[in-house]
Image (cartoon, helix red, strand yellow):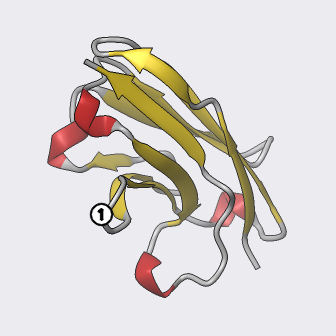
Amino acid sequence: QVQSVESGGGLVQAGGSLRLSCATFGFPFSSYAMAWYRQAPGKQRELVATITSGGSANYVDSVKGRFTISRDNAKNTVSLQMDSLKPEDTAVYYCNLKGDFKSFASWGPGTQVTVSS
């Protein structure tokens, strides 16, 4: 069962930056593709970025060029560098396996990101 703890969120002005981190436990991290997801108030959870076990990254169009996902297989962590933040990036951010996330039963507490205009 995947266990994760996200950190690094906060309140930032539009145009600012944050770096999120996710510590994972309980599974062979280096063998799995990982992802960051987010859930804005009143909206469904959505995919933000993915990274393969080998480090290849992909992003949804709304964050391309602004967010960078990375991983450290030695430390079982995945990170999300977020630059040029916009108010519409406000959400709770979660990390988890890449996949059919709507069926995932296990989620960490998430970390709140709030971007003020």
Residue at the image position 57 percent from the left and 31 percent from the top: 9
Vertical order, 21 against 30 (above or below): above
- Considering the image in quadrants, where does the N terminus appear? bottom right
The residue under the point 48% across, 87% down is 103
Q: Residue at x 28, y 12 (%)?
A: 15
- Residue 59 location, x and y as percent? 28, 47
* Figure check: 18 above or below 36: above
Image position, residue 72 (x, y; %)? 68, 39
Quadrant (top left/top right/bottom left/bottom right) for the C terminus = top left
Residue extending furthest toward the bottom: 103
Q: Which residue is mark 1?
A: 43
Q: Quadrant of residue 104?
A: bottom right
Q: From what the image shows, is residue 20 above or below residue 54? A: above
Of the pair 11 and 98, the residue shown nearer to us: 11
Residue 98 visible (yes or no): yes
Q: Position of residue 13 (x, y in %)?
A: 36, 13
Q: Which is more toward the observer, 56 or 96?
A: 96
21 relative position to 1: left or right: left
Residue 100 visible in the shown view: no
Residue 76 placement (x, y as % from top left): 75, 49
Tally the numbered discs.
1
The residue drawn where x is 17% and y is 42% is 62
Amino acid type shown at disc 1: Lys
| Most distant residue in the right direction | 26
Tell me the element at label 1: loop
